[in-house]
Amino acid sequence: MGNREAISGKTGSGELTRYPDQDIKLAITTIKEIKMLKKLSIRAEDSTLSLLGDLMRKNNKEPNPAGGAGYIVDMFQGLYRKTLIKIKGMFTAQDLHLLLDVTNGLILSPGFAGQHILADVEDGITLARLDMHHKVNSAELLKKIGALSIPERALIEIWLKGYWEQHGTDTAVSIEEYISPIL
């Protein structure tokens, strides 16, 4: 196993300890790649804050919703990357073009996270015949999406939305460049 020397530092909610060889497949392998944490302010519904407090109490810890929210934000990157690794090769280029087509203009809603993609693909196929336009086997595509968990679908929705959000930036890439890492 690699270098197990811990890297420690202060954060807004306490101590941070990280090992350079964690998530080696996700390219977090050296001390140089670990950056100082930035302060982030978020808004959350009362029910979310209550849930975070309840979870901490169940683990015999003092309720600290900010610490719980920090954990969720920090774990997002790993879950996002692992989901993209999981779907690598699952979808054809035509499938991904259809998925991008149906999410153009999509407004993500936390209450429907992971549920947008299936409904939008079904509507795109039924109402606009996008399966014909993109030369996609609709039954196979719907089966692939249906095999994913709701959290995986939510992360894919974020990835799809990311393509549309990059337009007008200095780092914008073509559709082919965007989808190529997961083909």
Image (tube, rainbow, N blue to C red):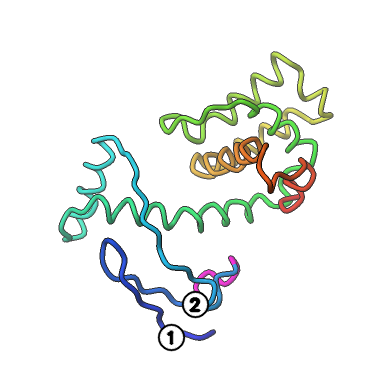
The reply to whether the magenta stretch includes residue 24 is yes
Magenta-colored span: 20-26
The answer to whether the residue labelled 2 contacts the one labelled 1, judged by CB atoms less than 8 Å apart, is yes
Q: Quadrant of residue 165?
A: top right
- Residue in the image at 60% along x and 69% along y: 27
Query: In the figure, 56 relative to 8: above or below?
Result: above
- Residue in the image at 21% along x and 41% along y: 50
3D distance between C-alphas at marks 2 and 1: 8 Å
Residue picked out by circle 1: 5
The residue nearer to you, when weighing 94 against 27, is 27
**Image x and y of residue 94, in percent:** 80, 36
Which amino acid type corresponds to the residue marked 2 in the rendered image? Pro
The reply to whether the magenta stretch includes residue 62 is no
Query: In the figure, 172 relative to 25: above or below?
Result: above
**Image x and y of residue 73, in percent:** 41, 52
Image side of residue 30 versus residue 169, left or right? left
Image side of residue 105 versus residue 54, left or right? right
Which amino acid type corresponds to the residue marked 1 in the rendered image? Glu
Chain-order first, disc 2 or disc 1: 1
**Image x and y of residue 45, in percent:** 29, 35
Total numbered badges shown on the rendered structure: 2
Image side of residue 72 versus residue 61, left or right? right
Query: In the figure, 103 relative to 159: above or below?
Result: above
Secondary structure of the residue carrying numbered label 1: loop
Residue picked out by circle 2: 20
Image side of residue 101 versus residue 2, left or right? right
**Image x and y of residue 146, in percent:** 60, 35
- Residue in the image at 75% along x and 34% along y: 97
Secondary structure of the residue carrying numbered label 2: loop
